[in-house]
Amino acid sequence: MKAPIRVAVTGAAGQISYSLLFRIASGAMFGPEQPVILQLLEVPFEKPMKALDGVAMELEDGAFPLLKGLVLTSDAKVAFKDANWSLLVGAKPRGPGMERADLLKDNGKIFIEQGKIIDAVAADDARVAVVGNPANTNCMIAASQARRLPAERFTAMVRLDQNRAQSLLARKAGVDLTEVKNIFIYGNHSPTMYPAYPHATISGKPLPEVIGDKEWLRGTFCETVGKRGAAIIAARGASSAASAANALVDHVRDLVTPGAIHSVAVKSNGAYGFDPNVWAGMPVRTTAPGAYEIITSYQMCDFCQSKIAATNKELVEERAAVAGML
Ligand code: NAD
Ligand code: LMR
């Protein structure tokens, strides 16, 4: 049996965590051979801490063989201590009529503090995945506080958007989901994101040959993927939770699986014309557990370039809006 890894999860009594924690404990994220110790952070108020006790009871009652320990705390220094992975879920979700960027002022502060503490107390091999919205910019904020950990260790989740795009394309083409490949998300986790359909394939053929409806691809498809979060809020009265947890399982599992190719928001370093200092979704290839390289070989048509310019502009504006905090 391998030594357990420490996985810190923030917002552990929230909606996403209620789906996420049980998947981690079951081995879905780190594999069936990897024991885990879950270090769960909540805000220091009676209601969430009591709810966290209840979640812990249910984790115990799951009798998960891989779950080797549980830490429940409202102290970030305890939650992130020696953490190999920190999953930053805890933040306010948006309500109807809001954009994710509207959360920046409230949620940004959380990521300043947590970025500093992770840098100070997490394990030497620490990796961070940000889910709390606006995820890309919160990730940039957390990374800006790090002196010890390199920026590449901080990633934000656009995998839910990739999964949404893959599922929608499969339904449109009338094929099994697994026939849709190489659909990657560029830019912000917001309606400006670009799901780059020209590079995707369906049953091994270029996607534009299978779905010839250019109007639908440029319009309805991009818009539906970009606004799916809002559609779920309108339908459920609360933001996506189980599908977000599932996407985070995919995000981390693929980052620890060498050879996996997937969409991750990373420090762009100028790839695809993004501002070098924003965290933008793009295709990466996992090179070793926790390490990745950006795939820079996709050619961008004029339409792709205009979409990337728009989502880059938004990321640069979000960065400017929090510049005073960094
Ligand atoms: P939720 O309100 O159900 O849970 C959030 C939890 O975080 C709450 O229990 C709250 O007490 C806790 N929390 C708040 N501040 C904290 C802090 N500083 N430290 C630790 N815990 C803290 O919300 P949710 O539905 O679980 O969503 C969480 C976040 O994830 C939201 O910002 C939401 O918009 C975002 N989200 C992102 C994606 C994505 O694809 N990136 C998808 C879905 C949701
Ligand atoms: C989503 O995409 O479902 C989440 O980011 C929640 C939201 O605010 O849209």
Image: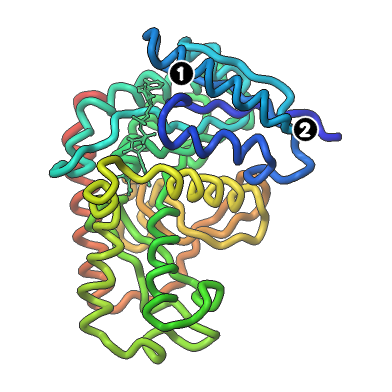
- The residue drawn where x is 71% and y is 29% is 67
Determine whether 244 is above or below 311 in the image. Answer: above
Determine whether 141 is above or below 312 in the image. Answer: above
Q: Which residue is mark 1?
A: 51
State ligand 1's quadrant. Answer: top left
Q: Residues within 10 Å of mark 2 (few under 14, many from 20)?
A: few
Q: Residues within 10 Å of mark 1 (few under 14, many from 20)?
A: some
The response on whether ligand 1 sits within 8 Å of label 1 is: yes
- The residue drawn where x is 44% and y is 61% is 163
Describe residue 88's horizontal placement relative to residue 57 as left or right: left
Nearest to viewer (mark 1 / mark 2) = 1
- The residue drawn where x is 41% and y is 76% is 171
Q: Residue furthest left?
A: 97
Look at the numbered disc 1 and give the secondary structure of its residue.
helix
- Amino acid beneath label 1: Ala
Asked whether residue 217 appears in the rendered view, the answer is yes
Determine whether 33 is above or below 227 in the image. Answer: above
Look at the numbered disc 2 and give the secondary structure of its residue.
loop
Q: How many circles with numbers are drawn on the protein? A: 2
For residue 65, the mark is 2
Asked whether residue 277 appears in the rendered view, the answer is no
Render colour scheme: rainbow
The answer to which image quadrant residue 99 occupies is: top left
| Disc 1 and disc 2 in contact, CB within 8 angstroms | no
- The residue drawn where x is 49% and y is 81% is 175
In the rendered image, the quadrant that contains the N terminus is top right
Describe residue 24's horizontal placement relative to residue 193 as left or right: right
The foreground one among 205 and 21 is: 21
